[in-house]
Amino acid sequence: MTPRLWKAGATHAALITLVLLITFPVVYAVIVSTLSFQQAYVYPPRLVPGTELWHNVVEAWDRVHMGRLFFVTSVISVGTAVVKIILSLMAAFAYTHFRFRGRALLFPMTMITQMLPLPVRILPTYELMASFHWINSYSALMFPFFASTTGILLFRQFFLTVPRDMTDAARMDGAGPLRYFLDILVPLSRTNIAALFVIEFIYMWSQYLWPLIVTNTEDMRVVQIGIKMLIATDQISPAWNVIMAGTIIAMLPPLVVLMVFRKSFAEGIAMQSQK
Amino acid sequence: MAAVSIRNVYKSFGDVKVIQGISMDVADGEFVVIVGPSGCGKSTLLRMVAGLETISSGEIAIGGRVVNDLQPKDRNIAMVFQNYALYPHMSVHDNMAYGLKISGMSKSEIAARVNRAADILELSKLLKRRPRELSGGQRQRVAMGRAIVREPTVFLFDEPLSNLDAKLRVQMREELQALHQRLRTTTLYVTHDQVEAMTLAQRMLVMSIGKTEQIGAPLEVYTKPATIFVAGFIGSPPMNLVPGRLDEAGAALVGEGGARIQLPQAYPELGARSLTLGVRPEHLEACADKDALLELQVDFIELLGSDSLVHGHIGADKGRTRVTARLHASVKARNGRTSLRFSAENLHLFDSETGKRFEA
């Protein structure tokens, strides 16, 4: 073999090893979800898929009422992502196209509130939700997430790249600010909107700590809590095959969202890094 | 159609005075080019006519109506931008129809107008395309179409050809002229390109940093530049400008380093005065030594084919008294020197202090 082939071979070997390393936990979870209870406990671990997948999925689905969990989580994920996108678009429009008193102060303030991580804000926010009597409600699950620094920044950076001539052309055409926003800016932000939707949907779908705190009834639980509930505390040996089956189901919606928006998502992210 | 009247207009951004008292009357149907170097405020002036910038003081009237406080859409004008400013997500048709749709025009009327404009601009086959699927020239035509469909009383162009390559620019220049001849709409056209200004304008307004230098027909501006600035800006290669002092008799100019230029005739009334002499490269001609008005020491020659540009200096100071002559290619510069002359009608004399032209 020539040195060039050696080099290419080595690179590929390194990359393949890395990919295997990264995907192994997911692959192993899929394998375990197809095994029976006993098979999941054999040593050394079994790496050949079994035949119990369907059984495990049904078991997991029924045991924690996965249907209800999916419904609640879908509502908060889609709802939060949509509201977040609308608010971010409007805020970015205001910050980039209007001069108003306090603009210079307001923008960093928006940033600062969002820079504090959730655990720091969690107690005061809980207090607030409780004082609104919002515990166990969709409002409590969604409201604290509506303002998004990421979103505002994303759209702000994009709006800044829209040429002034285009804004002027719209003014000459007689488009007022709202019309310009809806007819020109929002359609042009299509790929950014898709990117933000994917990011925010997955972010909300993975929420665990906050829903755990502001809900305490069965019917307001979210998917991630459902997975935890599969690991019943009174069992000495958890049924890993069923737990993994539940995990696999929980992974599917984000995967579907990502697949659907994959092209726009990639374009949106690429556009950000180009500019 | 309408006349445009700019009356003593000023514009400041904070402390920076961008436009310092410009007045001009544009007749109905006239094609006026506003020309000047980058940063002279010409685009700002156009944007004030458009209503995209406020007017700090003075008045702008369109069709006899003062428009200072009117929104762009209420001024009955249309503008073509340098970067075309087409809406990327709309088809060619929608780009042209957008303004009409907002104004609440009926669908049939919109369709009729868009089709008529597309016809004029040969865009009929491209109506369904998106801007990114068009060439630069086609995009420029769509931008013009968007202006035409409004059937405005005034067209405003802000450097519309500067993003096109040289060949396309010449072609679009012709199309613009043809369009103006067909529609006869009053047009204000901003450019930094003096060739574009010369070829398109019926009259031109030459600007330097916020001020009017000269208003006039292209030929008038070329043959009788009102100031040193205009003399140096209009014409390519630019006019030779030699500062110096006339002798007592007003018959010769003595520049720095002993540079001496004999004048074709004496100007006794200007005798012993400091001034700047101007003569265009194309108005210098080679001659016998005894007829010479100036002796050029040749530094280098650019061959253009039909002509040569002979660059050199007169006198000892190479930096201050540079002179370029456009001579026929057959003329050979002897011994690195050549004798040149020019006629009195091609001589320009300017006051070195004020920059103003002396009328002989």
Image (tube, coloured by chain):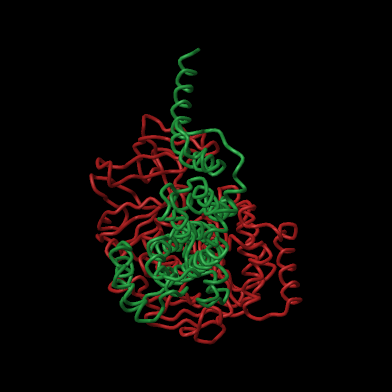
Chain colours: A green, B red
State the residue in front, A3 or B108.
A3
Say if A120 sits above or below B331 in the image.
Answer: below
Q: Quadrant of the C terminus of chain B?
A: bottom left
Q: How many labels were placed on the picture?
A: 0
Say if B49 sits above or below A15 in the image.
Answer: below
At a point 30% along the width and 74% down the height, the residue shown is: B14
Question: In which quadrant of the rendered view does residue B181 lie?
Answer: bottom right
Viewed as shown, does residue B179 lie left or right of A86?
Answer: right
State the residue in front, B10 or A137.
A137
Horizontal and vertical percent for residue A128?
A: 33, 77
Q: Is residue B48 visible?
A: yes
Viewed as shown, does residue A198 lie left or right of B209?
Answer: right
Q: Quadrant of the N terminus of chain B?
A: bottom right
Horizontal and vertical percent for residue A123?
A: 29, 70
Viewed as shown, does residue B210 lie left or right of A74?
Answer: left
Question: In which quadrant of the rendered view does residue B92 lie?
Answer: bottom right
Viewed as shown, does residue B173 lie left or right of A227?
Answer: right
